[in-house]
Image (spheres, helix red, strand yellow):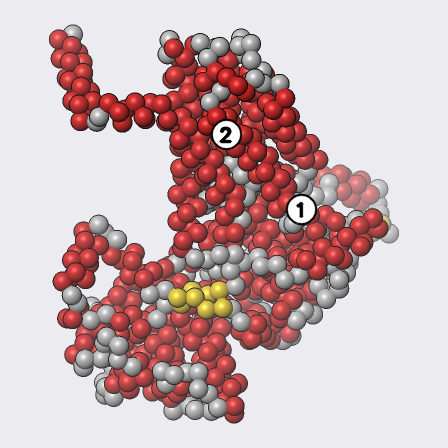
Amino acid sequence: MILSTVSSALIFVEKRRLMEVIPDSVIEFLTKWEVRVLILFSLTLQILLIALGNRRKYICRIWIRIILWSAYLLADSVATVGLGVISKNTLDEGGRNVEDPLNQLFWFWAQFLLLHLGGPDTITAYSQEDNELWLRHLVGLVIHTGLAFYILLVALPGSSWLPILSIFIFIAGVIKYGERILALRSANSENFQDSMLTEPDPGPNYAKFMEEFTLKKAEGFYVEAAEVIEIPVPTHHSFPDDKGKLIPEAYDLFQTFKRLFADIILSFQDRDSSRSYFQNLTPKNAFDVVEVELGFTFDVLYTKTSQVYNMGAIVLRFLTFLFTCFALVAFLCLCDRSKYRKFDLAITYVLLVVAICLEMYSACVLLNSDWTVNWLSRRTSTFTSIIGWWYKQQANKQRWSRKMAQHNLLDLCLRVNPGVCSRMQKLLRRIQKLLQIDNFLEKHRHKTYVDVSPELKDLIFKELNKYTRIDDCDPAVLWNRRGSFTLETYVHLSLGWTKEGEFDQRILLWHIATDICYFLEWGDDANNVSTTSIERKQISDHSKHISDYMLYLLVACPFMLPIGIGMIRFRDTCAEAKEFLGERNLTSGKTKAKACKKLLQVNTEVPPAKVKGDRSKSVLFDACLLAKSLLAEKEYRWKIISEVWVEMLAYASTHCRGNHHARQLRKGGEFLTHVWLLMAHLGITEQFQISQGHARAKLIVK
């Protein structure tokens, strides 16, 4: 008892001290304006979410992720705090005055906070982890709805029309909040996987078959169980060259291949049907189909799309829009606005008008989506002219970033020279190390982007498709070789030693060797190319882009590559490269071609591993040894390098789990994901292991 009294006294003293520190004018201002600030801030966050939520699937820049991440986290918190402040004021003695115009407005605004908690259609989950927390959001729905309902009950005895209008906004808020919970629940990994499982199939009635078999045999007949071969029904496709067929064909494939994102095995019939379809496509059309499929996947996992494309959801969406419009009209026509302050009236108008505009914007986004085009295309008899026009509008629609991130080891080492850093730079690095963000910044500071060109898509598609046409050959085995299949074709180069080691080691080896070959052949000014070398330059550019992209995956997205010690090898190699270049004063603006020449001048007669041992995982001079062998093969050099990189890209994509591919869709998509899904369509994956149909048998009685 004494301790409780003492602690209460201490808390009281601390509060008094705090009030002495903060001026009374500031406290009065916060008390008077906190609700208004919270409601306007919540509205601003909703506008940001709905405007940027859908754009992140084709914008890979970090600024949009920072803004969306901040808005997504703040939106629920601000709305929750706003509801808490209004409900607390309602519990106070002064807040129970139902005839007070300010209280009536606050109670009306509280229902808009519930509406904001429902979130926009364009973003329900920022990441896949949010879908896993759908139960937490369900608890939030109960609590927030309870608070809003309590405020509504307190307001209802009033003589104003505002409590009646609050009911309509409350219902609209509950509907939108419920849609959000259902969307999160359906995208949850467990429910997402369960939704794609077929109904339990007991198969043919074995017991009944054997009873008949035994009975006929007992009657003295010669009985034989003969297997009936079921001939699969061929699938007829209308290829995307046909007007308006791209999106519906992609949707049909999406319905089957979305199982890969849940790590569900597909059937050989699915493989054969998809392979026959893709083998007749051009590289552009093949990647276009994959792009549309991944767009559907993004919508299912991160938006409310799965909840709004049915008749019941459309009716509910129409009701929310109707209720909000009615609230605006009724407020203009029925409420006595003279008793409210002009600023408060302006806030009310803004809340109502923006809510209606956001509903209209959501409807426009839905109408302009591939889901609507797919729905219309299946009703050709009624909407033929509409489909033709709509397809033209959607043909060049950007559905992903169409970019590859790039990370280059030698560029990183050439830009950094610790010996010439200013005091300010050294201080910043110490601060970064103290905050433990130095490694994170090191990964992303030197990241750049390049466009995924149509020529690069052509190269990859032709290389992948080449082996699917070989009889009696499983392409999944061929593309499980990590680049060794190409090297076996060029035995005279004696590059068999590069086939050994882990996958991350091979990425670093070929990355550095590709970089050295590229800059020694084309120099630092790689744009000045003669007309006779355009094709050679193009394939070398493709090789370098894949090389830098694979290093980016190794450094920034190691979860998308096979397990290894990639970061240890990368850092050890960087350390050796920085030491070598620093000793020769080749950092801080020196040309890269000169640095490559210096690296090749090192005598590698003795294998580096024999000198360095196994403690350091650096592969710098092993890569130089590889570069020397490649430089000796002038005619087929870039053909070899490009084929090796396509093999390694294919190997990485097939060894990345589906949920990791889905995870990257929220960041503008990874090119690796497009290659992975394309390979699955061509049958180059190990996830085809189920034979559909039953081995039917019939009795033959003689």
Quadrant of the rendered structure where residue 428 is?
Answer: bottom left
Q: Is residue 631 shown above or below 142?
A: below
Residue type, numbered disc 1: Leu
Q: Amino acid at mark 2?
A: Ala
The CA span between labels 2 and 1 is 31 Å
Mark 1, Cα crowd under 10 Å, few <14 / some 14-19 / many 20+, is few
| Residue 242 image position (x, y, % from top left) | 75, 64
Q: How many numbered discs sit on the rendered protein? A: 2
Q: Position of residue 414 (x, y in %)?
A: 26, 74
**Residue 367: numbered disc:** 1
Q: Quadrant of residue 315?
A: top right
Crowdedness near tag 2: few (<14), some (14–19) or many (≥20) residues, C-alpha within 10 Å = few
574 and 46: which one is in front?
46
Query: Does the CB distance between marks 2 and 1 fall below 8 Å?
Result: no
Give the x, y percent position of residue 153: 51, 12
Measured as percent of width and height from the top left, residue 695 is found at 71, 52
Which is more toward the observer, 61 or 413?
Answer: 61
Q: Is residue 486 visible?
A: no
Q: Taking the image as drawn, is residue 424 in sight?
A: yes
Residue 346: which disc? 2
| Disc on the earlier residue, 2 or 1 | 2
Q: Label 2: state its secondary structure.
A: helix
Residue drawn 43% across the image and 66% down it: 449
- Name the quarter where the N terminus is drawn: top left
Vertical side of 632 occupied by 434: above or below: above
Question: Who is closer to the viewer here, 55 or 355?
Answer: 355
Secondary element at image label 1: helix
Residue at x-position 25% and y-position 88%: 601
